[in-house]
Image (cartoon, rainbow, N blue to C red):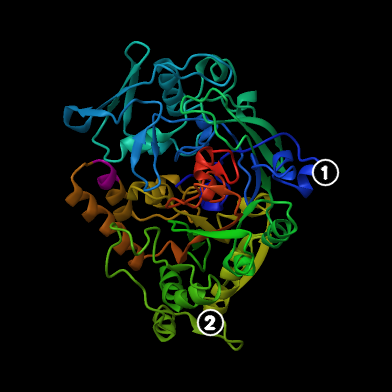
C-alpha cells in the first residue's frame, strides 16, 4: 500500500496527447475515428491526480506506470514477468542476494542508453533519508545495490524478504537527468523521462495528463498513439462526460455504471481488488481512542448492507486490509453485525446512554467527526451508513466533506473515511497501515494505531521466508485487530469501468486502491488493437 494510497491519491498511469481541443472534446478518439478509420487515441476519466510522476518519490512503485519500466512487471494474472531484466532474478545466499541481468536494447525517451547504473541510482536515491519517498520502509530489507558492468545488477538484503522481487517492478529513473536535480523539487517530478511505452507530453494540474506512444519502446510502439487521462474528481460529472462523448472510458461507482448497461456501444469491466474503505479511529481522540468504543463500532456496523445497498453487490465485507478471499485471510476473524453486542460492550465500559440517546462517560459525550473526500460518492455513502449504524449504538458521528488540504491537518484527532489496499504480499497492505512507528507519518498509519503485538508480528512477517512463520505472523495481526481495532474496515470494492467498445485486447488485473490510474482496462493500453484497423 502506498503512503498516499490510503487517502486515495496514488501513483498514476499515463496517456495521450497535448491539450484537448474543442474537436477532441466532441470526438475524443481523434481525427482517425472522425474520418471513419480506426481510432488511435483515447481519453479516459480518472478520479485522482498524482502528486508526482517521479518513481524516486513513490510514483509507480507497484509497477505499470507507463512512463517507466521496472526490472520486472506483472502480467494479467499478477505473475511476475521480465521487463528491463531479461528474466526473473537469480536468488542465492539463502535468499539474501538477487541478481538481475538487464536488456541491452533499451533507451530512455531522450535517446540515452539505459544501463545498470540507472538501476543503482534509482534504488540508492530512494533509500537516501533526504528523499521524500513515503514508502521507503517497503525497501527496508535492502542492504546494498551494485552494478557489475552495464548489464548486471546485484541486490543484497539484510534479511530474507520474501516479496523482494515484487518490489523490483518499480520504475527506473535516468541518472543523467534526475541525478542532476533536486530529487524532491526538480523538474523531473513533473516532466519525467523514462523507458516506458508512453511519454508525457503535458500535465495540466487538476485537468488532465497527456501522453504519446513511445515510438522506440523496446517492446514495440503502441497502436494507441495518444492517451489522455482527464482528472474528474466528481463521480456524477465523470458519468455525464462519458455519456456526452467527452470521454472514451471512466471509472464509476456501481450505481452510475449501471446506467450504461443498455448502451451497446460501451462495455463494462469489473476488476477484483484489494481496495478497501475504512474508518480511521484516532488514538488521540477521547472517544475513538477508547478500545471499547472501537470494539463496539466493529460489530455495530452492518457491512453486508453496505455491500448490498451502496456497492450493489460489487464487493464484499471487509474485516481488515486482507480480503476474505485471499489466501492470507485469517479465517474466524469475520465480525458479525450485532447491535446488542455493541451496546453491551459500551455498557460494560461505562458508556451510558444520555437523555438524548448519545452515550456519556466521565462527562465525555460519545461523539466525534468523520471526514470524507468531497465529490467521492462512495466515501460519502459509506460515511453516512457508518454514522447511521453508530447512532443506533449510542455513538454520534458527525459526517463532514472536505478536500485533503482540509482533512489532513485534522487526522490526528478526527476520523476519516479512508481507502487503501495493495495486492500481492501481506506485508504490502499491512506494514504501512499498522506499524506504530509510522503513526502520524503523512498518510501512513492515519489512526496512530499502537499495538506492540502487531508491531512484532509485522516485523516477524517481513523478516522470514518461511511460509509457515509468515502465515502465523499475519494471522496474529488480524486476530489482534479483532481485540483492538484501530480502524473499522467496511468493504472491499470491485472497481467498475465503462469504456467505448472501440478496441480489442482490454482486460483487468487484480487491482490496488490506486485505481483508475495505472489500473483499469488501460493497465495494458500499450497492447490495445483498434477495431477497424487494417489487418
- Left or right: where does residue 139 sit relative to residue 303? left
Q: Residues within 10 Å of mark 1 (few under 14, many from 20)?
A: few
What numbered label is drawn on residue 22?
Answer: 1
Q: Residue furthest right?
A: 22
Q: Nearer the viewer, residue 156 or 530?
A: 530
- Left or right: where does residue 346 sit relative to residue 517? left
Q: Earlier in the sequence, mark 1 or mark 2?
A: 1
Q: Secondary structure at mark 2?
A: loop
- Residue assigned mark 2: 394
Q: Nearer the viewer, residue 454 or 522?
A: 522
Look at the image and say whether residue 445 sits in the magenta stretch: no
Task: Estimate the x, y position of residue 177 in percent, counting from the top left.
Answer: 57, 17
Numbered marks: total:
2
Q: Nearer the viewer, residue 70 or 384?
A: 70
For the record, the magenta segment spans 459-463
Residue at (40%, 26%) from the top-left corner?
A: 84
* Distance between mark 1 and mark 2 Cα atoms: 54 Å
Amino acid at each position: 500500500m502506498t503512503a498516499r494510497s490510503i487517502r486515495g491519491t496514488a501513483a498514476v498511469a499515463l496517456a495521450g496527447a497535448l491539450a484537448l481541443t474543442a474537436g477532441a472534446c466532441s470526438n475524443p478518439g481523434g481525427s482517425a475515428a472522425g474520418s471513419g478509420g480506426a481510432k488511435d487515441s483515447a481519453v479516459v476519466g480518472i478520479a485522482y491526480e498524482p502528486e508526482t510522476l517521479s518513481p524516486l518519490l513513490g510514483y509507480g512503485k507497484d509497477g505499470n506506470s507507463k512512463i517507466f519500466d521496472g526490472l520486472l512487471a506483472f502480467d494479467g494474472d499478477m505473475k511476475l514477468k521480465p521487463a528491463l531484466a531479461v528474466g526473473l532474478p537469480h536468488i542465492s545466499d539463502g535468499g539474501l542476494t538477487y541478481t538481475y541481468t538487464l536488456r541491452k536494447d533499451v533507451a530512455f525517451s531522450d535517446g540515452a542508453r539505459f544501463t545498470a547504473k540507472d538501476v543503482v541510482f534509482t534504488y540508492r536515491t530512494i533509500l537516501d533519508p533526504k528523499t521524500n519517498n513515503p514508502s521507503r520502509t517497503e525497501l527496508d530489507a535492502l542492504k546494498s545495490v551494485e552494478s557489475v558492468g552495464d548489464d548486471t545488477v546485484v541486490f543484497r538484503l539484510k534479511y530474507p524478504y520474501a516479496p523482494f522481487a515484487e518490489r523490483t517492478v518499480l520504475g527506473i529513473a535516468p541518472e543523467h537527468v534526475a541525478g542532476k536535480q533536486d530529487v524532491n523539487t526538480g523538474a523531473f517530478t513533473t516532466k519525467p523521462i523514462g523507458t516506458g511505452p508512453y511519454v508525457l507530453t503535458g500535465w495540466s494540474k487538476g485537468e488532465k495528463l497527456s501522453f504519446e506512444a513511445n515510438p522506440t519502446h523496446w517492446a514495440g510502439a503502441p497502436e494507441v498513439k495518444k492517451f489522455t487521462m482527464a482528472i474528474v474528481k466528481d463521480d456524477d460529472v465523470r458519468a455525464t462526460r462519458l455519456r456526452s462523448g467527452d470521454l472514451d472510458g471512466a471509472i464509476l461507482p456501481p450505481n452510475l455504471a449501471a446506467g450504461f448497461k443498455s448502451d451497446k456501444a460501451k462495455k463494462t469491466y469489473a476488476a477484483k481488488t484489494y481496495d478497501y474503505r475504512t474508518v480511521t479511529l484516532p488514538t488521540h481522540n477521547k472517544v475513538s481512542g477508547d478500545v471499547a468504543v472501537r470494539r463496539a463500532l466493529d460489530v455495530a456496523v452492518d457491512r453486508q448492507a453496505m455491500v448490498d445497498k451502496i456497492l450493489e453487490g460489487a464487493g464484499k465485507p471487509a474485516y481488515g486490509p486482507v480480503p476474505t478471499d485471499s489466501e492470507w485471510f485469517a479465517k474466524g476473524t469475520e465480525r458479525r453485525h450485532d447491535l446488542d453486542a455493541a451496546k453491551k460492550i459500551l455498557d460494560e465500559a461505562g458508556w451510558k446512554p444520555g437523555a438524548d440517546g448519545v452515550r456519556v462517560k466521565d462527562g465525555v459525550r460519545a461523539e466525534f467527526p468523520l471526514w470524507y473526500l468531497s465529490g467521492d460518492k462512495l466515501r460519502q455513502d459509506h460515511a453516512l451508513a457508518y454514522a447511521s449504524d453508530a447512532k443506533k449504538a449510542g455513538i454520534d458521528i458527525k459526517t463532514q466533506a472536505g478536500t485533503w488540504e482540509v482533512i489532513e491537518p485534522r487526522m490526528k484527532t478526527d476520523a476519516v473515511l479512508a481507502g487503501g489496499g495493495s495486492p500481492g504480499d501481506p506485508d504490502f497492505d499491512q506494514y504501512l497501515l499498522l506499524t506504530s512507528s509510522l503513526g502520524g507519518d503523512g498518510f501512513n498509519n492515519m489512526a496512530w494505531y499502537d499495538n506492540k503485538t502487531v508491531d512484532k508480528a509485522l516485523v516477524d512477517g517481513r523478516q522470514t521466508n518461511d511460509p509457515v512463520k509468515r502465515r502465523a505472523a499475519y494471522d496474529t495481526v488480524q486476530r489482534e485487530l479483532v481485540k483492538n481495532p484501530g480502524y473499522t474496515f467496511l468493504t472491499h470494492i470491485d472497481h467498475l469501468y465503462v469504456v467505448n467498445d472501440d478496441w480489442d485486447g482490454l482486460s483487468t488485473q487484480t487491482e490496488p486502491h490506486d485505481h483508475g490510474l495505472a489500473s483499469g482496462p488501460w493497465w495494458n493500453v500499450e497492447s490495445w488493437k483498434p477495431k477497424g484497423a487494417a489487418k
